[in-house]
Amino acid sequence: MPILSSDTTRDEDGGAPQHKADRAKWLAVFARATRDELDDAIARCPDAPRFLWLRAPQTGLVLVQGRVGGSGDRFNLGETTVTRCTLRQQDGVVGTGYVLGRDAERAARVARLDALMQMPQHRNVLAAGPLTAIARRLAASAAQNDADAAASRVEFFTMVREA
């Protein structure tokens, strides 16, 4: 499962390449990572620039929607707690972090890694190591959940009675 694609687009004024589709992927992976995994990833970038909070970590509720049968009409399933934050590094790169729950420290780490992943010198280090390792762990966990669900599947059949 490749996390980063080789396709890049340039921003409006022809500046540095932007990995817009990749950003959603790495944010999803980092949002599901443990604190230890996030700390390990940040430790791989000792020369990371300082940052200022644009929005300090704050917790709130978001509405979760579901779909009938998984792909049908949408319906409001309920609310869940989410913690979010946004930071700006000294070089102007903005990082955003959203995590389920009330863990402000994890949200801050995700925002920090989001900003670092937008910097080419850190993207290569993070993508090759921690990001890939976290994605593999998540894929293995999902495969195990699928296997557990398949093991408990019950096949039903009906017999037609002729009169």
Image (cartoon, rainbow, N blue to C red):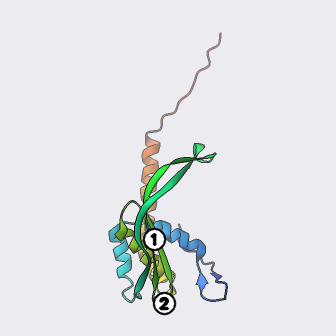
Mark 1, other Cα within 10 Å: few <14 / some 14–19 / many ≥20: many
User: Is residue 77 placed above or below 17 in the rendered structure?
Assistant: above
Query: Which element carries disc 1, helix, strand or loop?
Result: strand
Three-letter amino acid code of the residue under disc 2: Asp
Q: Which mark is residue 91?
A: 2
What whole-number distance in Å separates the C-alpha atoms at marks 2 and 1?
18 Å
State the image quarter where residue 51 is shown: bottom left
Q: Quadrant of residue 59?
A: bottom left
Residue 80's x, y, as percent? 44, 54
Identify the residue at horizontal 42%, vertical 68% (top origin). 134
Task: Tell me if 57 is positioned left or right of 154 in this view.
Answer: left
- Label 2, secondary structure: give it: loop
Tell me, yes or no, if residue 146 can be seen here.
yes
Q: Are marks 2 and 1 in contact (CB under 8 Å)?
A: no
Mark 2 or mark 1: name the one nearer the start of the chain: 2
Amino acid on which the number 1 mark rests in the picture: Gly
77 left or right of 44?
right
Front residue of 9 and 143: 9
Query: Measuring 36% from the left and 68% from the top, which residue is drawn there?
Result: 104
Residue 69 image-quadrant placement = top right
- Pick whichever, 119 or 12, lies toward us: 12
The C terminus: image quadrant: top right
Dot 1 corresponds to which residue?
97
**Structural crowding at the residue carrying mark 2, measured as other residues with C-alpha within 10 Å and reported as few (<14), some (14–19) or many (≥20):** few
Residue that sits furthest to the left in the current view? 36
